[in-house]
Image (cartoon, rainbow, N blue to C red):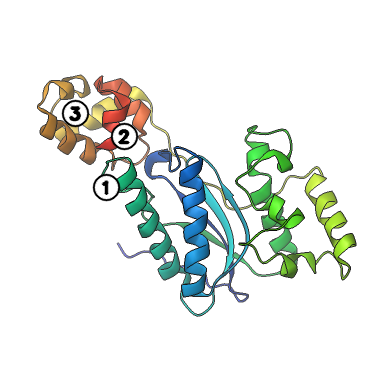
Amino acid sequence: MPRTPREKSPTGIYHIIMRGVNRQRIFEDHEDRQKLLEKLFKFRGVSGYRIFAYCLMDNHIHILIQENKEPLGRAMKRLSSSYVMYFNHKYERVGHLFQERYRSEVVDNDRYLLTALRYIHQNPLKAKMVEDVTSYRWSSYNEYLNDGYLVDKDFVLELFGPSREKALAQFIAFHGEINDDKCIEIEEPRMNDGRLKEIIRNRIGMDASDIENEDKMRQISILRKLKTIDGINTRQLSRLTGIPYIRVWRA
């Protein structure tokens, strides 16, 4: 069945989410996060896109981006492919890391641009990872307050006012407002253990608990097939099969 074409933004600006396949972590340490930002900066020179906000969570990424000379899909494919190559080499793994198709929504006016900006910066706060937005190291919020190299903050701050000092004050106040901002969300289908055991039995012709009795190469082959099931995650698969988490993760 052909994919539905993405809606085209009249401003060229999009809020996108790139997520780990089956909710898998895409960052294991700070080096990984820094590497992703370095690649985002590097490929900006190739693709010409502008970054207005970003936030790196454990298993997904938010980016507020404006495409330029290169279509956004091609730019995101270059970014994800390069990062996956780095990640797989570092952790001695193979296969997919990101969900095949990133999610996106059109940002077609200044008001929604600011809504998406705040939504992205407040992601760690609403996930209860931090107590305030300034405490999260891996978002672009602090780039607006200090020196940074990745975001085009002048474009955004001008929406708050012509004076840099007043614009920053308004920017901070805006992020401190109580809100119920609604933007694109990550689809997180979940499956209970009983249903998943049934699917595994139908897919490979054996019970999940029997997989660990297979030889190593056969286990890897089976695990790769099972990891393509929508709604499953690595920890659940490890629990049902009895195979250590790290071996499931690397398969």
The image shows residue 198 at horizontal and vertical percentages of 25, 27
Q: Which is nearer the eye, 145 or 71? A: 145
* Residue pointed to by mark 2: 249
The image shows residue 104 at horizontal and vertical percentages of 52, 60
Instruction: Answer whether residue 5 is visible to the viewer in this image.
Output: no
User: Seen in the image, is 28 located left or right of residue 65?
Assistant: left
Q: Is mark 1 on a helix, strand or loop?
A: loop
Type of residue at label 1? Gly
- Between circles 2 and 3, the one closer to the viewer is 2
Between discs 2 and 1, the one toward the N terminus: 1
Residue at x 71% of width, y 49% of height: 181
Type of residue at label 3? Arg
Q: Which is nearer the eye, 43 or 109? A: 43
> Residue 201, which numbered label?
3
Please tell me in which quadrant of the rendered image residue 177 appears: top right
Please tell me in which quadrant of the rendered image residue 11 appears: bottom right
Residue at x 14% of width, y 26% of height: 206
Residue at x 50% of width, y 80% of height: 69
